[in-house]
Amino acid sequence: MRYLHRQYIKSLFIEESYEKSLNFANRIYKHPSRNDIQQILSMRISIYIYVISSAALLTSCSSTKYVPEGKYLIDKVNVRTDARYNDINRSRMKSYVRQQGNSRWFSTLKIPLATYSLSGRDSTKWLNRILKDMGESPVLYDSLHTVQSARDLVAELRNEGYLGAYVDISTRIKKKKIDVTYTLHPGEAYSIGNIRYDIQDSAIASLLRMDDVRNQKLKTGQKFNVESLDRERKRITDLIVNNGYYKFNKDFITYNADTVAGNKGIDLTLTLHRYRTNQIADTSHVRYTIRNVDFVSGSQDDPTIHLRRGVLKSNTFITPQSTYSSHNLQKTYTHFGRLQAIKYTNIGFREVPDSTVLDCNIQISTNKPSTVSFQPEGTNTAGDFGAAVALTYQNRNLFRGSELLSVELRGAYEAIRGLEGYSNENFEEYSAEARLMFPRFIAPLLPYGFKRRVTATSEVSLLYDLQNRPEYHRRVLSLAWRYRWNDANHHDKYQIDLIDLNYVFMPWISDKFRKDYLDNADNRNAILRYNYEDLLIMKFGVGFSYNNGTDAIKVNMETAGNLLNLLSRPMHLQKNEMGLYKLFNIAYAQYVKGDFEYTKNIRLDYNNSLVAHVGLGIAYPYGNSTILPFEKRYFSGGANSVRGWSVRELGPGKFIGRDGKIDFINQTGDMKLDLNLEYRAHLFWKLNGALFVDAGNIWTLRNYEDQQGGQFNINDFWKQIALSYGWGVRLNFDYFILRFDFGMKAINPAYDNNRQHYPITNPRLSRDLTFHFAVGMPF
């Protein structure tokens, strides 16, 4: 037993022993004996002890190697408060501490410091230089920084209304390490008493009287803090500069605070001062109007602006005879900034001498209208390697209105392995796609005011895709017209797919594929057969998304076939042998589908965050359909779902796939649930790490014969929720993120026996570990 234990441990690190270890593991997992189980437990305990001991040794033994005599390594930094002041955010207050100690992976292990400490002192050796560059030098205790941190904490507490606050500092030294604790003593919070506004400019005073009192950010009785005072000052400043006062800024507004002994209330006086410069004594603030708005080219080589005059005016919110407005200035920048034809915009104002008018000069530099790009790429579909190339032409100013025309030609080839009995084992795909995007609403009935208020795009697209596989040939023709727009706050995004028409045509299916899967009486898979027939999908969809950096919401709804179904009888459409209406001799799909996602990002500190995600989707075929089209069905598993499973390997329900060639069809459903919790941490350089737990599954709403155990049941669906856990590594290159995730199965609903249903207690890497490579974050 000791020999097996030793050999198993060695096989974890020596490549030559891997095959022997794998054979041993397969034997004991397939036919385990009592002695084998004892060996497994012993091995696992030894491995866990080895890993934990190694990590502890790495992060503790050498951490003070580069700490000089008489200096101390900051080990822990704590921020505490009096027990009765639990409403103070200690995590936020900790950000005011100037020395935080060395960074910890997942808030636990100081791996960067340990990496630095592994280096030798000889800087001429390349290995030592690499270890120091990858690692992090020790953070040494500095008493001056500690005192300054305490002052900053006191200042922030007083800004929050705790005017009697003070901070205690305590330290604990153990060998060459030191723990620093800041104890906050806030005292009682002050509140706002009487509020008085001293407006020394009569015209502005009249403007503020017209403003709604409910918009004021200061209220009697609310907690006194500097942030509230700044919000009120900003509100007044924005109101004034948006009503013609070009030279006004927030420095003209000051506060005077009076406290009364023995009273926790503060009386405030907000003073708005008259206009003053070094050369001019106190005068009234000047309200400006716009006289002229001129457009000039920003290019020295080309004095012509290649945009229609109407396009320039429709994106400009600074108009002659109107008062100056900072809000309109920013809207003009925003609208010009989203035009594909424009490279940059610079807006300037010039005061007309001896007057209160401004001339506006809008300088515009345009991009080259046309570009051509060529992009090769490698492909890998389930181990089948191939290559693809794409040639793209773009015109950013097709009709001199910054319309974007994009035409892409794409070709792909892939060698398919493992197919037997087919004359050809290659996959070929050729596609042509054209998109035309207008940077505005192309809709005659929309109010002009709404069009001016939002930033919108209208898009029409046309796609033809030709696919030749050994089993079949498929042709897809798509036509779509859609709108996208943002509201004024830019957190809300909307989309309407006014029409999305997809025609799927199957000109050829091999005799072998038809015999084995479509016409075989023993394998008449309804879902499979439906997805290899000609099909017409005409859908209408709406979408909404919201993202403020902390909360993100996505909602999408779509429906297909309703208009066609409404016209079927009046148009006397024929039915096929299954009783489905046909248009142009093709059955059309009819369904309704809805999706909802919510993501919560909780920032723990600068390097760590906790992200929770919920995803729910449901689709129902009805009327002219009993089965959803394949591309509209849900699947589970993969890099963005339950990561213990590969794509389309989980569900529906407790369904178990038995034919690897067609399980990609059967492992789809009409309903999906995803629950994810991910802890994200910055490690060092551009390397980030993650620990995650995923749960979810898919189900069917109808009882399909070929998906046994897949139908949703309100009484026991919770028993069929799969669970996985894992870890990930991410390379953040700012413009894109490469993600490597390793997921382990924890609960597998496909099996009923405890050994296979709970892989978390009986893990096997060859069976339960799944690797995912992806670009971007999972949610």
Image (cartoon, rainbow, N blue to C red):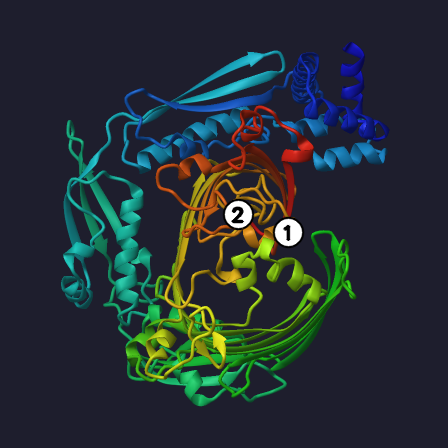
In the image shown, does 632 or 423 lie closer to the viewer? 423
In the image shown, does 259 or 454 lie closer to the viewer? 454
Helix, strand or loop at mark 2: loop
The residue type indicated by label 2 comes to: Ser
Which mark is drawn over residue 477?
Answer: none
The residue singled out by tag 2 in the image is 636
* Residue 528 visible in rendering: yes
Q: Is residue 535 above or below residue 110?
A: below
The x, y position of residue 702, in whole percent, is 41, 52
The residue that appears at 52% across and 77% down in the rendered structure is 461
Q: Nearer the viewer, mark 1 or mark 2?
A: 2
Q: Is residue 154 left or right of residue 460?
A: left
In the rendered structure, are the residues bearing label 1 and label 2 in contact, judged by CB atoms less than 8 Å apart?
Answer: no
Tell me the quarter of the picture where residue 409 sits. bottom right
Q: Is residue 342 above or below residue 273?
A: below
Closer to the chain start, of discs 1 and 2, is 2
Q: Is residue 704 left or right of residue 247?
A: right
Q: Is residue 723 left or right of residue 256?
A: right
The x, y position of residue 347, in whole percent, is 45, 75
The x, y position of residue 428, in whole percent, is 72, 69
The residue singled out by tag 1 in the image is 733
- Disc 1 to disc 2, C-alpha distance: 29 Å
